[in-house]
């Protein structure tokens, strides 16, 4: 059996039951997805569309192959809306938040989140590995989706049981390839080499307490954002190609010389040279052209474009956004897009919590030292103590936002307001506000004492 689409693989096995035969079966199941669906999605994002393979039997006819890449537009736009602004974190455990912020800074967490969101948008899922480097520092890095196969247990919650990472190393001297396989379980990491046959090289224990590979799903079906409009994009490209070919036909129109049978090739040369045609009695000269119905072609193209934006829930920013559109009008126009972003946030939040949980496990085991070598961890951390807030990078009316904040200021806390408008370090912002208040001078209540007038000295 071969898989051609994302299918959750569930089984109950122990580390002792992981064999090279089992790994080969899993890799064979994964291969058609990588070479089939994943490759198609990669190609369409990068502009390698079906129109480029178009062949016209008559090689004298034009064969234009323009590509209008809606796929990359959809992914880049939705990813920008989703994680274009960084996620902000808050916690009552200030020490945990401070340490976590340092770990995030060391790993460029904002860029990592964007990469994961982008990969999930293209292929329906992204993956990252959390690990300790040679110096014992906590790291997390985005992985190539093509290289990861997740295995889940058979419980109702489908907890990750094992992750298989496979990648190819090329020897440029010998011009040969070797496949490396890394298997992550809840307690161990196993390293294999496939050079004509899978062989176990080594193994080591890890201390995360669960599989240290985190999946970031784009939605519950693990589908990419532009998968549903690929056929429409193909039709749009074909429409553009056909009209381009027709225009070229028009440019290469045929000259018709009616009732001028005696015309020789030398006469044609003179016509081209002198730009003058002398017709015989009853003769006519005119170009034979193909009539272009621009209105029909344009309507068809516009309908395709509207369907693509509608089905992908992605706004056409060149039409939807105008300088005089109010914030409420923008919210209405982008309601379906916002709904898609909400679903992305729910899935992404769950994965971020898993990342923080893995980091907290290691911090509780080995601690964390600051730049001066001082231990910062003084108590056990709980990943549930970290709250996160997504900030959609979507066009809104600045004045409407300011008005909403002003109206809410008497109903909610200052911390909630700052979190809502996208401040990353809320606590630092509150401290800065208090500092500025303490240094302000109240000009309305400022009293200046008049210095006493000294008596004139007695002469």
Image (cartoon, rainbow, N blue to C red):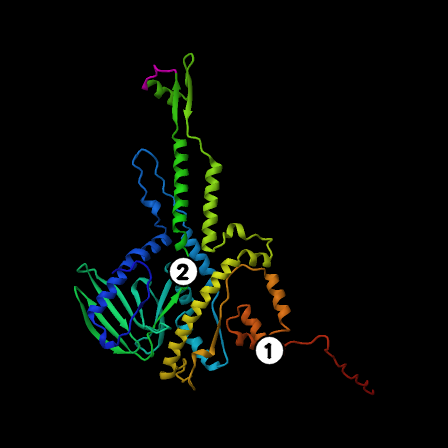
Q: Is residue 37 above or below residue 108?
A: above
The CA span between labels 2 and 1 is 41 Å
> Residue at (43%, 68%) from the top-left corner?
348
Q: Nearer the viewer, mark 2 or mark 1?
A: 2
Any magenta on residue 262? yes
Which of the two residues, 448 or 346, is positioned nearer the viewer here?
Answer: 346
In the orientation shown, which residue stands out farthest toward the bottom? 458
The furthest residue to the right: 459
The answer to whether residue 83 of the structure is visible from this angle is no
SS category of the residue bearing label 1: helix
Q: Is residue 354 left or right of residue 178?
A: right
Percent position (x, y) of residue 40?
33, 54
> Range of the magenta residues?
259-265
The residue pinned by badge 2 equals 121
Q: Residue drawn 36% across and 76% down?
A: 138
Where 168 sits versus 325, above or below?
below
Q: Which SS does the magenta portion mostly show?
A: loop
The N terminus sits in image quarter: bottom left
Residue 243 falls left or right of residue 443 = left
Label 2: how many Cα within 10 Å (few below 14, some 14–19, many 20+): many
Q: Which residue is mark 1?
A: 434
Q: Quadrant of residue 151?
A: bottom left
Q: Which mark is residue 83?
A: none
């Amino acid at each position: 059996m071969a898989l051609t689409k994302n299918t959750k693989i569930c089984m109950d096995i122990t580390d002792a039951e992981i064999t090279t035969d089992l790994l080969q079966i899993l890799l064979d199941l994964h291969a058609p997805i990588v070479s089939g669906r994943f490759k198609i999605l990669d190609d369409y994002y990068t502009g390698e569309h079906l129109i480029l393979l178009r062949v016209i039997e008559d090689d004298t006819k034009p064969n234009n192959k323009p590509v209008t890449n809606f796929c990359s537009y959809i992914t880049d736009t939705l990813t920008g809306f989703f994680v274009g602004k960084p996620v902000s974190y808050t916690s009552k455990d200030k020490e945990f938040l401070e340490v976590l912020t340092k770990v995030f800074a060391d790993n460029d967490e904002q860029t990592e989140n964007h990469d994961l969101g982008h990969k999930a948008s293209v292929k329906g899922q992204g993956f990252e590995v959390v690990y300790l480097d040679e110096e014992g520092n906590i790291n997390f890095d985005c992985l190539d989706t093509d290289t990861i196969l997740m295995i889940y247990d058979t419980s109702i919650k489908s907890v990750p049981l094992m992750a298989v990472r496979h990648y190819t190393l090329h020897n440029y001297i010998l011009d040969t390839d070797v496949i490396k396989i890394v298997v992550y379980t809840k307690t161990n990491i196993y390293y294999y080499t496939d050079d004509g046959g899978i062989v176990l090289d080594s193994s080591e224990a890890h201390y995360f307490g669960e599989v240290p590979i985190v999946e970031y799903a784009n939605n519950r079906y693990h589908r990419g954002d532009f998968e549903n409009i690929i056929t429409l994009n193909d039709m749009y490209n074909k429409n553009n190609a056909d009209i381009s070919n027709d225009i070229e036909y028009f440019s290469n129109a045929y000259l018709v010389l009616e009732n001028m049978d005696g015309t020789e090739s030398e006469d044609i040369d003179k016509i081209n040279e002198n730009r003058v045609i002398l017709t015989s009695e009853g003769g006519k000269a005119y170009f034979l052209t193909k009539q272009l119905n621009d209105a029909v072609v344009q309507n068809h193209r516009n309908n395709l474009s509207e369907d693509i934006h509608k089905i992908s829930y992605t706004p056409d920013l060149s039409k939807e956004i105008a300088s005089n559109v109010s914030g409420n009008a923008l919210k209405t126009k982008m309601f379906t897009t916002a709904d898609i972003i909400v679903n992305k946030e729910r899935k992404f939040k769950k994965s971020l919590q898993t990342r923080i949980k893995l980091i907290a496990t290691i911090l509780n085991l080995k601690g964390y030292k600051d730049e001066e070598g001082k231990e910062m961890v003084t108590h056990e951390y709980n990943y549930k103590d970290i709250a996160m807030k997504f900030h959609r990078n979507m066009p809104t009316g600045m004045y409407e936002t300011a008005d909403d904040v002003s109206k809410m200021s008497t109903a909610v806390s200052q911390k909630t307001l700052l979190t809502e408008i996208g401040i990353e370090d809320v606590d630092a912002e509150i401290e800065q506000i208090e500092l500025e208040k303490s240094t302000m001078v109240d000009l309305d209540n400022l009293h200046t004492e008049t210095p006493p007038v000294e008596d004139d000295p007695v002469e």
